[in-house]
Amino acid sequence: MDDLAHHSRPLSTLSRKRKADSQDCDCTVADPVSSPEPTQRDLQSPLPSRLTVPCAAPPTHRLSLETASNTAQGTWFTSRPASDTPLPSPSSPSAMSPCIPEPTADPDTPSRAKRPRIDAAKASSKTSKRAAVKRAQQLITALQASAGSWHWETSSSGDTRLVAPVPAGAALEQTDNSDFSLSASLSPGGLSPSASRVVIPIDPCSPHIPIRHPPINKETLKELDLDAIMRNPQLRHDFLFDSGLQFRAAASRRKREQAETYWSAVLRELELGCTCVTFDTRGRPHNLLCVCQRLPEAPSEPVIACMPLRRKLTLRMPSRLRPLLQELLQVLLSIIRPQASVLPNTQGGNVSFQQRVRQHMEQSQRLQAVLDADLIEQEMKHGVYDLSSSFGVIGEVLKSHCAPMRDAAVDAMVDLANKCAPGGEGTKADAVQAMRSCFEILELMKLDIANHQMQTLRPYIIHSSPDFELQTFKERHPAQQPFDITDQWLLAAHQRLEASNYTLTYPTRSFTFRTLCKRTRVILSSLRAIIDLIFTPPSTTLSEQATPSRLPGYPETLYLDHSRFALLAKDVADLSAIYMLLMLHRQLLYTSTPSGHKATGDASVLEAHLQNLKKEMWDLGPSNIGRCFLPKGMDGHPERSHRSSQNDEEHWTSGIKAVVLQVTRRATEARRPLTRNTTPIQNSASTAVQPPDEHLLKLAESWADRHLRLDSPLSTLMRERLCNTVFDLVVSTVVIRGNLTPASVALSASVALPEEQRGGVAGLEPLSAEVRQLAERLAKLSVLHLNVYQALYEQSPAIPDW
């Protein structure tokens, strides 16, 4: 690893003769050392800023431009704070990203070209080039004349840029600085230049600017701390529904690309010492035009070099190596920090807390010694840094804390680092890969610790959940704030049960709804309200600000269950669609046709036939087969464009046509005479595939067009029948059998559906397994909800006292 340090060429060897205007063009550079550098007339201006920008605008910084030197090599400017207010440090994890060019241009404009006779486009190109140089000159004049009241400004669309007012007497024409403005697609909120201000076009949140800190750092791992877990109401609530809930490493496409960009930038800095990123004058990424020869040392603050003749902006970023080493040390210390609660050591058995504290102090001192950023930087400059010695110590520390299943990964990381020892065959790419593997192992160790703590504290989380959730709800919703939606939701369910004269039937006797005590009426009204909300979700379309966890139109007390309600509503819609298609099949079996055939066979044969048909409908139908019964905005993709919604509608329509065709085909086969001891499905498998009856197919397609709709009277009737069946099952589980604990809500397969108990025929027999499973999920949701809010509902004025 003797060549880890970057040796830059001295400035005296980097002077070059100015090219003619005709030779000045955009260049694509692969090697930063040999890349075209900015001309001597180019200007640079370092400005402190943050690498990642939140939606809210950061505080205003007032900067003044002062001449640092004025030599034969050009005029250089540096920006200094006009006040004593400290500026954010670029080494902090929350630091924001760079953006301020200080361009310069030669006052001499290129000579006018001869007027072309034929090729008018060439004349337009030259004229545009001269106009761009002129605009750059005017922009430079405005920037130099400005005292520098730079501030962040965010548009209504969320775009953030640095903006500066142009002083009196230096105002630009509104159309003259268009090459240095935001493109039209990035400035819908009005962040565009004018005669009174200049807009720096580089987006500080651009994914083309590699982040300055590792993607796995102390801040990103904080959410896995035990304190953060215990203070997270959503996480604790989700844990009640899934006892096997575990944390996993984030694997989104955006995070993967961000990590690849960061580690590629680290490798480029190690190999070439380059931290440059190039944009055009509209803020769009461009092939690299390196300025490292002009700035051999990485600046402490981001620097932007403007090349007006090339119409490019190159961003020289601070070094990422020092923040990388500092972050590695901080993450290591946080991982090996002993926990206050005595938990079994994964490899050494139970040890006392004092012993773990002493061990932590010794290991912390060793890690701080081998990860001293100042010392490592000096060793890298002299080419004597030994990566293998540092990672040998890191490997020993990690193996004393990680689970045995991580030992192989730690050994592989240490072996890769040993290849980079002096005289070894390792490359700088191997060194970067070893460093990256170390961060990935640390993330896995943090996940292991968090998952172990969650399982260890599971009894406490379940026991304390009702009090914790109720306290959190009261903190979020003060007592003086009315719960309008919740009160209306409960009142509607109470009035519906009262109007239907609902009867609660126990094994020995029955009670009408009006004769029940308030506590029982609160439980029944809550169950009815929850189930009605599943079968008839709010029709309010999701706004741009709404998320799956903050759906509009839902009661305030369900704020932790919005995602579950959306999923349950989709499942109910799919079940309703299958229910209706099975009813269509029953009607086709006994519909008169010109051929005169009707279905034959006993009930057991028809039942087996329906079970096979149900499986085929799940397999052939679209994934959202019940999309027709969901209100607008509840189809699972509210953020999609109109064209995407049309594509989804076309996909659903084609899938439903395929299902209707299969339903008709099976009905046609069932109407034909069967061979002995065979079902319609087996009979069709033994003979050649025959098309469905044309008359039945037309009838089925017409039926599907009329009734597979949200506003169809028949679909409303059948969904109401399904809703009542599910409600009776949930009441039987929660109220009659008294299973008010989440662990005892499972329904036995031998439990008959309410329709079967009353001897009625609802057509739900083929869907008995799905209906029972849905009732179990709703019963568990209802029990957990009532454990928290039942006392609050009993005090609500929505439930009257009789």
Image (cartoon, helix red, strand yellow):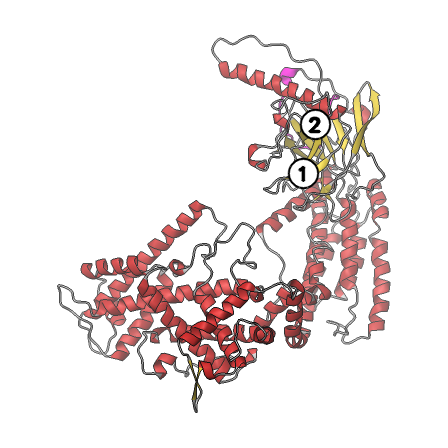
Q: Per the image, is 40 magenta?
A: yes
Q: At label 2, which amino acid type do we have?
A: Cys
Residue 786, horizontal then vertical, whole percent: 56, 75
Q: Residues within 10 Å of mark 1 (few under 14, many from 20)?
A: some
- The residue drawn where x is 84% and y is 41% is 382
Query: In the image, is 677 to the left or to the right of 179?
Result: left
Q: Can residue 242 be seen by looking at this rendering? A: no
Q: CA distance from mark 1 to mark 2?
A: 22 Å
Q: Secondary structure at mark 2?
A: strand
Q: Earlier in the sequence, mark 1 or mark 2?
A: 1
Residue that carries the numbered disc 2 in the rendered image: 306
In the picture, the disc for residue 783 is: none
Vertical comparison of 46 with 471: above or below: above
Q: Where is mark 1, residue-wise?
A: 153
Q: Position of residue 482 (x, y in %)?
A: 59, 64
Q: Between 181 and 468, which is closer to the camera in this rendering?
A: 468
